[in-house]
Image: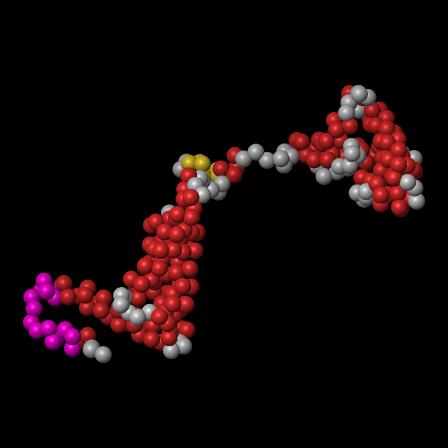
Amino acid sequence: MIALADFSSSAGPAGPAARENRGPLTAARAEARHDAGLVRRFNAGDEAAFVEIVTRYRGKMFAAAFAMLRNRSDAEEVAQDTFIRAHRGLANFRGDASLSTWLHHIALNLARNNYWYFYRRRRHATLSLDSPCGADNPATFADLVATEAAGPARAAMAGEFAALIASCIARLSARPREILTLRNTRNLSYGEIARELGISVGTVKSRLGRARESLRALLLKSCPEFGRQAPLVAWFEPARRAGGLEVVCA
């Protein structure tokens, strides 16, 4: 191997401009020789050499991918895939180009494939829900999306109504309270209730109907504003959405 000092002295005298131009070229040749040594070490079984390759070039591969994709997570993925492919292909690396050029070529091919994959799916025309609404507005688009989650007022109302239902069920006699508990608290099917009580499915349905009417009567005393003609869902929808007695109305 030619030492840098020997290489410089063999070129003969030169002016300041020639020495200035020779500096980057000499550094590039030194980098190429170092990279070639890393490749030889890796192909000889030295995994530490590959770790050094990744350390030297990961930033450059990320920058090349990000320049095309404009997405940090995609660019990180491309950089990672670049070194996965390099690890598999270094045994066939012939050195026709520098290691840096070879890696850059892999990264650009992966970035192009990534770009066109998402371009065909119109991702370039979309925004992440985690993106801020504006430069002066830190809120994200996700904050603007409607949600079915109950607000504080609605949650409080649903909680109070669920408590009212529970207190009315507690005031029922044993038989209607038992069948409502099996159906609404334990979420048993009609068939499972029939087997547990030793009665037919038809009897289960009729008992549930009578139990619900009894419960409705108790609720009317507490909340007469609903009226007897109100559909069952008008009574129990708040409790269902609060995760309460969801099958009282079914």
Q: Can residue 111 be seen in this view?
A: yes
Q: Give the range drawn in magenta.
A: 6-20
**Residue 136's spot in the image, x, y percent?**
41, 36
| Quarter of the figure with the C terminus | top right
**Residue 96's spot in the image, x, y percent?**
26, 68
| Quarter of the figure with the N terminus | bottom left
Residue at 16% x, 77% y is 6
**Residue 164's spot in the image, x, y percent?**
79, 32
Residue 62 lies left or right of residue 156; in this view the side is left
Question: In the figure, residue 109 lies in which quadrant?
Answer: bottom left
Magenta stretch: dominant SS? helix
Residue at 11% x, 76% y is 10
When the figure is inspected, residue 235 is found, relative to residue 33, above or below; the finding is: above
How was the colour assigned to the protein in this rendering?
secondary structure
Residue 162 in magenta?
no
Q: Is residue 176 visible?
A: no
Residue at 43% x, 55% y is 77
Q: Nearer the viewer, residue 225 or 177?
A: 177
Residue at 39% x, 52% y is 113
When the figure is inspected, residue 63 is found, relative to residue 11, above or below; the finding is: above
Residue 11 lies left or right of residue 197; in this view the side is left
How many marks the image carries: the answer is 0
Residue 58 lies left or right of residue 10; in this view the side is right
**Residue 140's spot in the image, x, y percent?**
48, 39
When the figure is inspected, residue 243 is found, relative to residue 33, above or below; the finding is: above
Question: In the figure, residue 232 lies in which quadrant?
Answer: top right
Q: Which of 131 and 199 is in front in this view?
A: 199
Residue 16 in magenta?
yes
